[in-house]
Image (cartoon, rainbow, N blue to C red):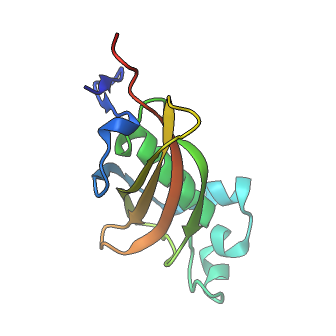
Amino acid sequence: MASTAEGGRQELFLDDLSVGQKFFSDTHALDAAQIIAFAREFDPQGFHLDDAAAKDTLFEGLAASGWHTAALTMKLNVQSGLPFKGGIVGAGGEIRWPRPTRPGDILQVESEVLEIIPSRTRPDRGIATVRSETRNQKGDVLQVLIAKLVLPRRPASG
């Protein structure tokens, strides 16, 4: 049986997962002020800072940094998407942004377990490969993250 976190969410061990299992996060509404604030701090490029300047770029308007989308994806997965025992601990992965994230987008993450590999050398853990798609309110995929996550195995009862 999975354990329960403080907020009442079930925390899942590697042994609780199955290939094809899906998880859905809550949503996050993004506005221009959030996009600009993140960009000022972490990715100060014109197309993330100023709508008028962004009109003459590849984005044709204000767009969130991909790293902002990635950070929001992580926040949504931690708070409501992936209830993994021990947290979301990455061991590598691949990320792509097929479409820009825009002011007014309402983000939600859908994650699917692709692979489960118990460790051969560390019997207390294993790797789950999870594909997380961050979508907007129209269903457009804004980010695809395929991550190898380290999860603990269920302790032997004794």
Instruction: Say which quarter of the image contains residue 55.
Output: bottom right
The mark tally for this picture is 0
In this rendered view, identify the residue nearer to me: 103 or 142: 142
* Residue 126 in view (yes/no): yes
* Residue 34 in view (yes/no): no
Q: Residue at x 48, y 67 (%)?
A: 144
Q: Is residue 58 above or below residue 37?
A: below
- Left or right: 26, with 102 as reference point: left
Q: Which residue extends farthest top? A: 158
Q: Is residue 90 above or below residue 157?
A: below
Q: Which residue extends farthest left? A: 1
Q: x%, y% of residue 13?
A: 38, 33
Q: Residue at x 62, y 88 (%)?
A: 58
Q: Which residue extends farthest front? A: 120
- Quarter of the image containing the C terminus? top left
- Left or right: 20, with 31 as reference point: left
Q: x%, y% of residue 5?
A: 35, 23
Q: x%, y% of residue 114?
A: 39, 59
- Left or right: 85, with 43 as reference point: left
Q: Is residue 73 above or below residue 102?
A: above
Q: Residue at x 52, y 56 (%)?
A: 147
In this rendered view, identify the residue nearer to me: 4 or 30: 4
Q: Is residue 142 above or below residue 158?
A: below
Q: Residue at x 59, y 66 (%)?
A: 66
Q: x%, y% of residue 68?
A: 58, 58
Instruction: Say which quarter of the image contains residue 17.
Output: top left
- Quarter of the image containing the N terminus? top left
